Amino acid sequence: MKSKLMSDKLDLCEAEGEATRVLNRFPFAELPICPFTIAQRVGIVVQPKKSSEPGVSGFLLRVGDTFGIQYASHITNDGFIRFTVAHELGHYFLPDHASHLFPQGDGTHSSHSGFVSIDRYERQADYFASALLMPEQRFRSELLRAGEGLEAIEHLAMMFRTSLTATAINYARFADTPVAIIVSSGRQIEYCFMSDRLRELPKIVWIKKGDFLTKSTTTYKFNANIATDKQEKKADGSCTLDDWFDDAPEIEMSEEVVRLGSYDKTLTVLYTDQDLEDELENELEDSDF
């Protein structure tokens, strides 16, 4: 597990470094960063493409030294289209990606962008896309003024013209407060990202893909309503951290849920502005009685 985490961090660092080099080569004075412009500047044509392949968001094409990018035409979310194009640019710019994806020299590579794939190259291209579209220094600066929770994430997504999911993951990465971002479908969790403040909690058992939602959570009830064709787009409530994470302390969290487009998937934002150390001390004192 530790070796996998270390490998993932190295991939992230390499992706961020390459994205920074690209932005230094093709600087943007103002936000948002446009992946279509970067593609044009390196001679890559970007086009939509009809695709019946489930889960495929984009394609990188290679003929000799010429590359092209296509994104699935069924995607209607502007932020996700831009993320998909940036993901394919990651495959183009990142060292070893082209030789790995095109071992015979020419061909077409199908991508699953948006942090849904466990493949190392797909994940690294996602990291590149996030770093390209949401450069750390600019993102941190805007994060300080954005507020908290889903409202802050929606504001940042509009400013950077990025998908809600990618923005939420970045929000968790750079937040100084305890934050968890969970994507779920039906009763099951697909993946979870946590802020460093949350990861630092002792003994906390991390959420895994396939874990089941707790029935007492707002997310469980919200997803049940989607299954019965009720059209709520958002919901908010409260929970305790141990409703989500085994062996976590009973710290009260805000829980906000939003439906992701027309898909039967939801994005959950868990957050609190409470000082975790104070809360843990209080809980330990209570347990002494």
Image (cartoon, rainbow, N blue to C red):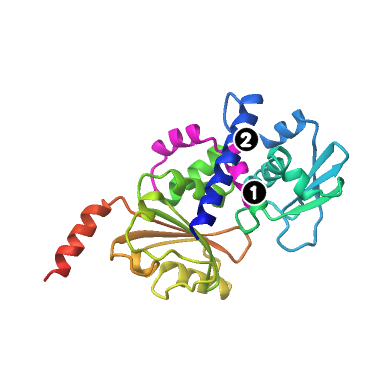
The disc at residue 18 is 2
> Which structural element holds mark 1?
helix
In depth, the one of 97 and 30 nearer the eye is: 97
Label 2 neighbour load within 10 Å: few <14, some 14-19, many 20+: some
Is residue 40 within the magenta segment? no
Query: Which residue corresponds to the image point at 39% horizontal and 55% vertical from the top-left?
Result: 199
Quadrant containing the C terminus is bottom left
| Rendered location of residue 14, percent (x, y) | 59, 40
Looking at the image, is 80 positioned above or below residue 161?
A: below
Residue 63 drawn at (x, y percent): 88, 42
174 displayed left or right of 26: left
**Up-down relation of residue 90 to residue 198 (above or below):** above
The residue drawn where x is 65% and y is 30% is 22
Residue 48: % across, % down: 79, 47
Label 1 – label 2 distance at C-alpha: 21 Å
Give the mark nearest the N terminus, 1 or 2: 2
- The single residue placed furthest to the left in the displayed view is 289
Is residue 27 at all visible to an observer of this figure? no
Q: Residue furthest front?
A: 3
For residue 112, what is the image quadrant?
bottom right
Residue type at mark 1: give it: Phe
**In the image, what residue occupies the spot 49% across and 32% down?**
138
In front here: 96 or 59?
A: 96
Residue for badge 1 = 80
Instruction: Identify the magenta region.
Output: 123-148
Residue type for callout 2: Glu
Q: Nearer the viewer, residue 275 or 98?
A: 98
| Res. 163 visible in picture | yes
**Crowd band around label 1 with a 10 angstrom C-alpha radius: few (<14), some (14–19), many (20+):** many
Residue in the foreground of this view, choosing between 26 and 227: 26
